[in-house]
Image (tube, rainbow, N blue to C red):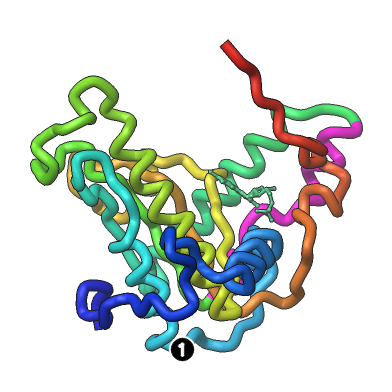
Amino acid sequence: MGPRDLPPLGRDGEAPDGAFPEAFRAQLDHLMRMRRDVRRFRKDPVDEAVLARCLNAIQLAPSVGLSEPWRILRITSDAARTAALKNFESANAEALAGYSGERASRYAGLKLSGMREAPVQLAIYCDDETAQGHGLGAGTMPEMRRYSVVTAITLFWLTLRAEGLGLGWVSVLDPDQLSRDLQVPEGWQLVGYFCIGLPEELHDSPELERQGWEMRQPSLAIETR
Ligand SMILES: Cc1cc2nc3c(=O)[nH]c(=O)nc-3n(C[C@H](O)[C@H](O)[C@H](O)COP(=O)(O)O)c2cc1C
């Protein structure tokens, strides 16, 4: 069932101004707090019906000019998975070489992808040359198409988490090499490589905080002009 086949939203329990019920808002807040970038996956397969439901969230995302520029490749073959993993390993070694001293040992201790274990792996691209949307908004700022793909990934990420699945975003990659290995069309730009599966553990704080790499800011800074 695609998102457009869903029954109309009921207004039961909604406030007259269209706000969702307080209990729902509390759950949504909880979902956002408990979303994590996951790098440690169980090897159990992912239920295809659940995955399909989560992928539907992508079609609900906003996009500049309604261009829907997301392009999704599911990486299933041994050859494609091996090429992606090799790509990550060499980019990760190169990144490590850019650090020194204590930062280098901390970096070396991080696990920055679950590509060896994750049962589902996707490479998500942005089609920078799509005619859909007739260029609205992208004429002045072409990067808006890529931002649109990121909004879709965020919805997908939260939906996966709500279904008990984890997502790990891998960006330590040579995008040109990956695009050659996956034989993607000209004009597609890599937005990220994604590992999906059942998480080994659940956490309410980022792994990079727990590993002492970086901390979230305690509050949101807002400047005025
Ligand atoms: C655009 C983007 C790229 C990222 N790339 C990586 C990556 O290559 N490897 C990794 O382990 N985590 C990656 N992450 C995850 C971040 O490290 C993570 O979101 C951050 O530390 C906060 O943790 P949390 O997502 O669990 O709240 C990426 C996240 C984003 C949004």
Q: Which quarter shows the N terminus? A: bottom left
Residue at coordinates 82% horizontally, 48% vertically from top-left? 209
Q: Is residue 132 above or below residue 199?
A: above
Mark 1: few/some/many CA within 10 Å (<14, 14-19, 20+): few
Residue 41 x %, y %: 65, 74
- Report if residue 116 is visible in the image: no
Residue 105 x %, y %: 86, 40
Which secondary structure, mark 1?
loop
Q: Which quarter shows the C terminus? A: top right
- Quadrant in which residue 74 is drawn: bottom left
Q: Is residue 148 above or below residue 165?
A: above
Residue 19 x %, y %: 48, 62
Q: Is residue 116 magenta?
A: yes
Q: Identify residue for label 1.
A: 47
Residue at coordinates 23% horizontally, 51% vertically from top-left? 68
Q: Is residue 166 above or below residue 150?
A: below
- 58 and 168: which is toward the camera: 58
Residue 5 x %, y %: 21, 80
- 168 and 141: which is toward the camera: 141
**Is the CB of the residue bearing disc 1 within 8 angstroms of ligand 1?**
no
Q: Which residues are magenta?
A: 102-118
Q: Is residue 137 magenta?
A: no
Q: Is residue 208 left or right of residue 28?
A: right
Q: Amino acid at mark 1?
A: Asp
Q: Is residue 193 left or right of residue 167?
A: left
- Report if residue 103 is visible in the image: yes
